[in-house]
Amino acid sequence: MGDRTFLRGGTVIDGTGNPPQPGTDVLFEPDRIIAIGPAATQAVDSAVDRVIDVTGMTVMPGLIDAHCHITFGEPASNDELFFHRDRSRAMLLAAYNVPKLLRAGVTGFLDADCIFDLGPALRDGIDAGLVTGPRMASGMNALLTAAGGTAGRLIPDSGQLGYAQVVRNRDEIVTTTRQQIKYGADWIKVHLTGSLPGRSGELTVFSRDELATVVDTAHALDTPVVAHCRNSHSTQLAAETGVDLILHASYLDEAALEAVVASGAAVAPTFTFLANLIDHGAHVGAMTTQRDIFLGEIEATAAMMARAHAAGVRLLCGSESGFSLTPYGEWHARELEIFVEVLGLSPLEAITCATRNGAFALRRPEGSIGVLAEGAAADVIVVDGDPATNIRVLGDRRNLRHVFARGNAISLDPPQPSRRPIPGEKVGLWSQEPLLWERVHP
């Protein structure tokens, strides 16, 4: 009959947007929710292995992070990411880091682009029980043109480096897309915009025909496409060519909003990285030159994103964890706070974006995961507090009392062992800035 768990008397937030249900019992086993409410109470018998009184606490689905770079290893720079990672050490880091997500209440995530080809292997290792981690959907290398992505001239003119696979023509687009699917990619990622020297913002670096080739090739093999879009033109282009999930959708304008609504594409704005630099970057010596740029990006995007939500666009929560400004296990719930405080969503609406809507990122049918319902996946967290009135409760891991992934209890204590840097993992700097004579002799 399985290892059954009975949660007694908690307030249930089911992830669908329904009002909280106080004093509600939940019964589940690996990997299925058996019953909720009176049906759960009636189904309790001697076969229940674990009874937990959660009176006064909130029971809800585990969070699904739709934008998490688990193989990056928290680099502080693109130089560190591209030139201080080798395949074997990167996999060791990923296997060490992925349990941190569970300890933060994340029971599912999408890693849309990995370094080397590590993502599908890590996903399969988690599924096989070799590595402890949330459910994972994975892409492989992001497709880029020779114009590059956010790493500028570090991106080669051809070939592969870090998370990037440069495709130079239609034949390479088709071949690479098919190969990635052959080797286990759940998603194909496209870096649709990139930073070019002397240009402000990010420019669209794929043509319509090139992007359509990616989408048509992937869809023919029953694989969705996710695109990094940090200007309005790219967002409109992605929607019009059939991209399934749009990341960022920065500087959304009327035409792009109309295209997204018409297409049915989902959007993961991923404001967390930007907000962390704006609000907390000074604590860790982050570059202040980016602060005003990122603040402007959020301000220019938030109101249109709220309109997209009101128009029925499916919003997903993503943290972009994997960088020094968004380390694993720390900021996965911050996107919900931004959805509430900046976009104006209610806490329950934000929770739905981070739970039920996340099924799309995991390529699971809506209602089968990210919700508390009979027959759904048994990914459940118990929180001390009421996120329906204070969404910040979810961001404080001290409030997390229980995590169940696939119906199995995850130990939250003792803390994960600390580690030392792997030799060569971090960039060694002689100084943060030039040692000018005037600094020493004012």
Image (cartoon, rainbow, N blue to C red):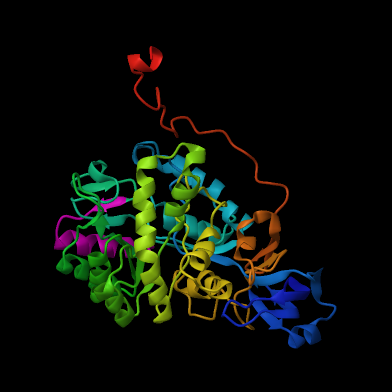
Task: Check the image and report above or below for 297 versus 91.
Answer: below
| Quadrant of the image occupied by residue 406 | bottom right
Can you see residue 249?
A: yes
Q: Is residue 172 left or right of residue 392?
A: left
**Between 170 and 22, which is closer to the camera in this rendering?**
22
Task: Check the image and report above or below for 359 versus 163.
Answer: below
- Who's the residue at 19% across and 49% down the image? 199
**Between 426 and 136, which is closer to the camera in this rendering?**
426
- Who's the residue at 23% across and 74% down the image? 241
Q: Residue furthest front?
A: 442
Task: Check the image and report above or below for 313 versus 39.
Answer: above
Q: Is residue 395 left or right of residue 36?
A: left
Task: Check the image and report above or below for 17 versus 214.
Answer: below
**How many badges with numbers are in the image?**
0
Residue 235: x and y, percent? Answer: 28, 68
The boundaries of the magenta stretch are 164-186
Query: Does the segment drawn in magenta span residue 128?
Result: no
Residue 424: x and y, percent? Answer: 43, 30
- Who's the residue at 69% across and 71% down the image? 59
Can you see residue 220?
A: no
Residue 105: x and y, percent? Answer: 61, 61
Q: Is residue 80 left or right of residue 365?
A: left
> In the rendered view of the protein, which quadrant contains the N terminus?
bottom right
> In the rendered view of the protein, which quadrant contains the C terminus?
top left
Query: Does the segment drawn in magenta span residue 178?
Result: yes
Q: Residue furthest top?
A: 441
| Quadrant of the image occupied by residue 101 | bottom right
